[in-house]
Image (spheres, rainbow, N blue to C red):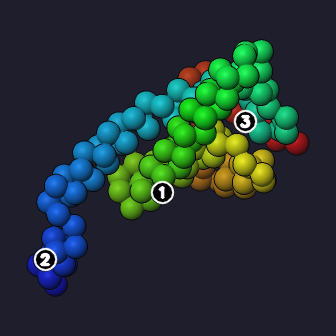
């Protein structure tokens, strides 16, 4: 059974693609182990209460602001896709997806953030990270 699965996988995806997926998985795993705690620890405890977050690059030239927003949204998409992949590969899938959603600007973002952050497993993991760093837990209304 396993041999048949391996043969099917090899027929669908080249060895180079498998190596690329493995390398991406390792880089994404290590990157999220560093980036997720660093970002989530720096957020204020009332971050998810505030519906009107401070605009990125608000006091900069419109071109700089546009480039900053483009880069921020692209990074969010990368984290979101990596998080989706980590649901099947090693890594912190839900936390990585949450980080991606925090970075992306889209309608309904606040509701989705609230739904994800209030998931007991996610909230417990994030507040445990914050506690280890000496930061207070996230608060809600």
Residue wearing tag 1: 84
Q: Which mark is first along the chain, 3 or 2? A: 2
Q: Which residue shows up at 14% across the image and 60% down it?
A: 15
Q: Is residue 47 above or below residue 64?
A: below
For mark 1, does the 10 Å Cα neighbourhood hold few (<14), some (14 to 19), or many (20 or more) residues? some
Q: Which residue shows up at 39% across the image and 61% down it?
A: 88
Q: What secondary structure is found at the residue carrying circle 2?
A: helix
The quarter of the picture where the N terminus appears is: bottom left
Residue 55 point in image, percent of width and height: 77, 27
Residue 39 location, quadrant:
top right
Residue wearing tag 2: 7
Residue wearing tag 3: 138
Is residue 47 at least partly visible in the picture?
yes
Q: Is residue 50 above or below residue 59?
A: below
Residue 65 location, quadrant:
top right
- Residue furthest to the right in view is 141
Q: Which residue shows up at 24% across the image and 50% down it?
A: 20
What is the CA distance from the residue labelled 1 to the residue labelled 2?
25 Å
The quarter of the picture where the C terminus appears is: top right
Q: Which mark is first along the chain, 2 or 1? A: 2
Is residue 93 at least partly visible in the picture?
no
Q: Which mark is first along the chain, 1 or 3? A: 1
For mark 3, does the 10 Å Cα neighbourhood hold few (<14), some (14 to 19), or many (20 or more) residues? some
What is the CA distance from the residue labelled 3 to the residue labelled 1?
24 Å
- Residue furthest to the front in view is 63
Residue 44 point in image, percent of width and height: 73, 26
Residue 9 point in image, percent of width and height: 20, 72
């Amino acid at each position: 059974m396993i041999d048949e699965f391996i043969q099917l996988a090899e027929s669908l995806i080249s060895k180079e693609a498998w190596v690329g997926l493995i390398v991406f998985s390792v880089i994404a795993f290590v990157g999220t182990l560093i980036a997720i705690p660093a970002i989530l620890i720096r957020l204020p405890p009332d971050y998810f209460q505030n519906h009107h977050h401070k605009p990125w690059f608000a006091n900069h030239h419109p071109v700089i602001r546009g480039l900053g927003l483009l880069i921020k949204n692209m990074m969010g998409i990368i984290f979101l896709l990596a998080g989706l992949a980590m649901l099947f590969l090693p890594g912190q899938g839900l936390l990585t997806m949450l980080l991606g959603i925090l970075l992306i600007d889209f309608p309904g973002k606040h509701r989705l953030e609230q739904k994800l952050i209030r998931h007991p497993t996610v909230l417990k993991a994030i507040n445990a990270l914050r506690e280890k760093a000496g930061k207070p837990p996230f608060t809600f209304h």
